[in-house]
Amino acid sequence: MPELPEVETIKLGLTKLITGKKILKIDVLNLKSFPNNKADVDNFILGKEIINIRRRAKLLMIDLSSNYSLLIHLKMTGQLVYVSDDTRFGAGHPNDSLINDLPDRSTRVIFELSRAKLFFNDQRKFGWIKVIPTELLSDQEYFSKHGPEPLADISPAVFKSNLKKHPRSNIKASLLDQSVIAGIGNIYADESLFLSKIHPKTLVKDLSNQKINSLINSIRQVLELSISKGGSTDRNYVNAEGKKGSYLEFANVFRRENQSCPVCHSTIIKIRVAGRGTHLCPNCQKATMVE
């Protein structure tokens, strides 16, 4: 599933490319992917100008001049691919639809813009695009279930308070809990815990204030690095400059089991924590006070 940095990368890329353009036509090839009332589409979407693109957790919001928005969830295999005569930008699930001719068999919705097209591809058809009045976006159930944004509005005090609501949870599970902090997936949990020298099985109640402060700083550092590298995708990712995402080339522990730790040269291991494959350095992240 595309993670927060990948969705942020989509936001940044599309902001450059489609802001100010009008949506001239929409071809819906799969109704489940675009479950909207035709009258709403005709009245509030077609012919309207794109004025802003935002992200909340792993959702995108494309705001229009009609005071309506397109709310987009890529789910497991969703992609957005922009194609014009001189530019191609694609992000999301890393398969060949990002770089091949479109539409293809995974294309579900096609937006015709001014001298360009925006393709919504989704192999498994779990993603969706909904038409919603902009002022009602904050009322969506998805948003109420998510905690603060790690790159924007979360303070160490809020992070600490959210973590300590479940003191006997291990820290890896807590980071993956979207009500604690929004948008953290498996890759970023492992990398953040490594930078903070915290074992993934450490219980929340056993973390010192110093470790919690270190962890929130590490989360921001890891996410900002990933965004600067174009996300974590390591296969067929193409950003707005035509470059592949490269974060995993710089990852410290994720997918590096049996390799040397970049800090102490111990062997990185892979274990299972919170139901997920988890990568760590057993020397840098000592299993002290782990149940």
Image (spheres, rainbow, N blue to C red):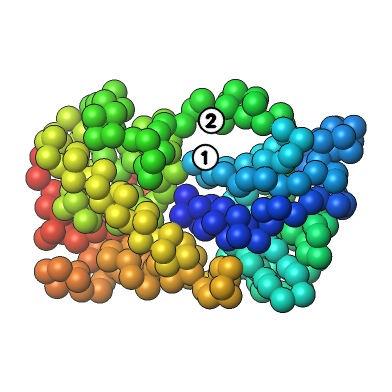
The quarter in which the C terminus is drawn is top left
Q: Is residue 200 visible?
A: no
The residue at the point 71 percent across, 53 percent down is 20
Q: Nearer the viewer, residue 131 or 196?
A: 131
* Kind of residue at disc 2: Phe
Left or right relative to 224: residue 92: right
CA–CA distance in space, label 2 to label 1: 8 Å
Q: Quadrant of residue 14?
A: bottom right
The residue at the point 30 percent across, 49 percent down is 219
Residue 39: x, y in percent?
Answer: 90, 32
Q: Quadrant of residue 281?
A: bottom left
**In the rendered image, the vertical position of residue 257 relative to residue 75, given as above or below:** below
Mark 1 secondary-structure assignment: strand
Q: Which mark is residue 56?
A: 1
The residue at the point 41 percent across, 31 percent down is 147
The residue at the point 78 percent across, 62 percent down is 117
- Number of callouts in the render? 2
Q: Is residue 220 visible?
A: yes
* Kind of residue at disc 1: Arg
Point out the tag, 2 or 1, that comes first from the N-terminus: 1
Left or right relative to 52: residue 112: right
Q: Which mark is residue 143?
A: 2
In contact (CB < 8 Å): disc 2 and disc 1 = yes
Mark 2 secondary-structure assignment: helix
Left or right relative to 241: residue 229: left
**In the rendered image, the vertical position of residue 285 relative to residue 67, given as above or below:** below
**In the rendered image, the vertical position of residue 102 relative to residue 61, given as above or below:** below
Residue 166: x, y in percent?
Answer: 28, 26
